[in-house]
Image: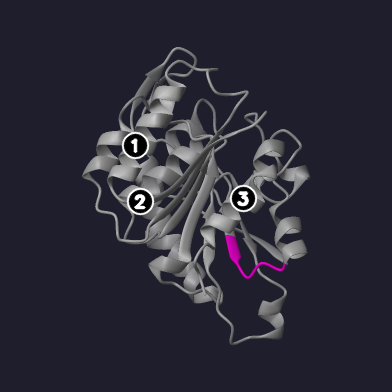
Amino acid sequence: MIEKWGIPVAGGKKPRTVYVYLPDAAREEPEARYPVLYMFDGHNVFFDQDATYGKSWGMGEFLDDTGTALIVVAVDCDHRQPNGRLREYSPFDFADGEFGRVRGRGKRFMDWLTGVLKPLIDRRYPTIPDRECTWIAGSSMGGLMSLYAITAYNHVFGRAAALSPSVWLVGGQLTPVIRKGDFAPGTVVYMDYGEREMGSHQGMLRCFMDTANALMEKGVLLTSRIVPKGDHCEACWEEQIPIFMDILFYDRE
């Protein structure tokens, strides 16, 4: 079951859509409690008709077919032009030939997600609110934000999946944050890039490797991979769902 409702985001006035997936078992077992996966770009997560390019991740179908005991909360991004999504999903200011100068407001968004949205979800739904059962995932800029979240908000999130994270776009600004970060033991991160997208932007491979090395140096339980024939698109990210979900659930009783 997927619920849709609106809420103003990070100081904005116009409500944005929040998608919440609940396992069918939640209606049959009202006392049960579930881990929660927060996801970026909520419009691309569940429904093709809502997706930017007409193709979603199909997350609901995967969860239903596998009977996965998980709540997923996915928030629509800032679609305002120019660069609304880039501002919201970057923790850092950056300049790029394609996008110009962008003032990152990622911290503001994460403060809202952790300080406003998460408490609301924990009150309204049958969650396990503990850090160990609170996860985050996204792709592209959402992948960058997932890495930032697991680092800067490690007291909130225990596990993260970052698919095709746009670490190259902010240069080397993420790795010092990781190296200064305070990671609790048992922090789990999945991170990937598609074979066909690797090299499409300057510095992608170097930034990917630097990020992976920094996470491992901090003792993070990292799974890092290059997806064979992988592209930068929802169809490819959908194919990775079974892989990163196994990692998010790894070693859980």
Residue 160, image x, y percentages:
46, 52
The mark found on residue 109 in the picture is none
Query: Principal SS element in the magenta part?
Result: loop
The answer to the question of whether label 1 and label 3 lie on touching residues, with beta carbons closer than 8 A, is no
Question: Can you identify the residue that label 2 sits on?
Answer: 220
**Is 79 located above or below residue 238 in the figure?**
above
Residue at the spot x=64%, y=31% of the render? 228
Q: CA distance from mark 1 to mark 3?
A: 21 Å
Res 184 → quadrant: bottom left
Within the magenta stretch, is there residue 36? no
Crowding near pointer 2: few (<14 within 10 Å), some, many (20+)? some
- As helix, strand or loop, the secondary structure at mark 1 comes to helix
Q: 117 or 90, which is in the foreground? A: 90
Crowding near pointer 1: few (<14 within 10 Å), some, many (20+)? some
Residue 59, image x, y percentages:
69, 53
Q: CA distance from mark 1 to mark 2?
A: 10 Å
Question: Can you identify the residue that label 3 sits on?
Answer: 243
**Is 8 located above or below residue 250 in the figure?**
above
Question: Can you identify the residue that label 1 sits on?
Answer: 213
| Magenta part of the chain | 67-72
Q: Visible in this render: residue 16? A: no
Amino acid type of the residue that numbered disc 2 sits on in the rendered structure: Val
- As helix, strand or loop, the secondary structure at mark 3 comes to helix
